[in-house]
Image (spheres, coloured by chain):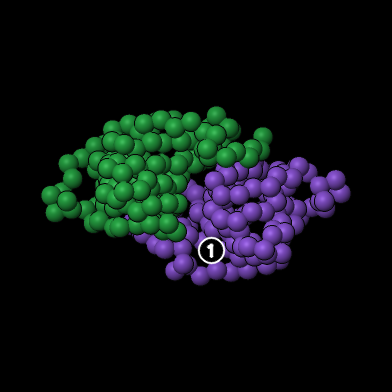
Chain colours: A purple, B green
């Protein structure tokens, strides 16, 4: 069944393991999505997702709003609207919004029964 | 290999079968994307993608900019920034930008060897 849905209609939850970070599931398995799921993240000012990896799952992301730092395998990138990011499985990644404005990005993941995550100690060099 | 890429760095091509419509492949199999591919479409003013369906492929979409009409199985929706759209396989869909501003949306598809499309006669009632 097709659907058309404003993101403002979708409830947001705190993202597990993160600070001042929220997730909205825009299109997912409950809608019948067979292969991948579309989520939107909001990093409030001061928001942070610590370093982690997913052994079996890649991410494709697109920045909608604001600016934040994403660190991929120890290398930081300052990103803003219009940036696409590919994070293969097993890539260590973390996020930090040091600015005064909320930042938003889309994150697409493959549909899986389990969504494995391994939290890791971020390398000192990336801080 | 992870990647961070501005969409403005990605070349755009005319979308096949469409008018005044362009596609950019932001993250795809050439980048190693294993399961799904992220594209951005631009519908210029007057841009149009005629009615069609994909027998084997769903779309998940997110509107970035502008306004346009998307018609799903004969029902038109006026959409704008922040709208998510799920188009299951075999859903007839078409697009038209009747406004004065370009419209942009993301479209994610599963990675497949072939990308089947069937162009169909749009129902008169939806015009």
Instruction: Report the residue marked by disc 1.
Output: A24
Residue A120 horizontal side relative to residue B77, left or right: right
- Percent x, y of residue B8: 52, 37
Q: Work out whether A125 lies above or below A43.
A: above
Q: In terms of depth relative to the viewer, which is nearer, A97 or A95? A: A97
Q: In terms of depth relative to the viewer, which is nearer, A53 or A49? A: A49
- Most extreme residue toward the front is B100
- Percent x, y of residue B88: 36, 50
- Percent x, y of residue A126: 81, 47
Residue A17 horizontal side relative to residue B9, left or right: right
Q: Work out whether A102 lies above or below B14.
A: below
Q: What element carries label 1?
A: strand
- Most extreme residue toward the right is A124
Residue A119 horizontal side relative to residue A86, left or right: right
- Most extreme residue toward the left is B124
- Percent x, y of residue B30: 55, 29
Q: How many labels does the image show?
A: 1
Query: Badge 1 local density, few (<14 within 10 Å), some, or many (20+)?
Result: many
Q: Is residue A106 visible?
A: no
Q: Work out whether A111 lies above or below B2.
A: below
Q: Is residue A87 visible?
A: yes
Q: Work out whether A110 lies above or below A48.
A: above
Residue at x 67% of width, y 34% of height: B1
- Location of residue A117 by image quarter: bottom right
Chain to which mark 1 belongs: A
Residue at x 18% of width, y 45% of height: B122
Residue B72 horizontal side relative to residue A108, left or right: left
Residue at x 44% of width, y 32% of height: B12
Residue at x 32% of width, y 31% of height: B16
Quadrant where the N terminus of chain A sits is bottom left
């Amino acid at each position: 069944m097709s659907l058309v849905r404003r993101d403002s209609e979708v409830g947001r939850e705190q993202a597990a393991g993160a600070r001042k970070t929220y997730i909205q599931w825009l299109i997912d398995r409950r809608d019948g999505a067979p292969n991948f799921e579309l989520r939107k993240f909001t990093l409030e000012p001061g928001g942070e997702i610590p370093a982690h990896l997913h052994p079996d799952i890649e991410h494709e992301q697109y920045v909608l709003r604001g600016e934040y730092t994403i660190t991929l395998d120890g290398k930081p990138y300052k990103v803003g609207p219009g940036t696409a990011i590919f994070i293969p499985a097993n890539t260590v990644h973390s996020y930090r919004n040091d600015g005064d404005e909320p930042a938003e990005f889309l994150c697409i993941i493959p549909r899986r029964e389990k969504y494995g995550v391994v939290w890791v100690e971020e390398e000192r060099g990336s801080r």
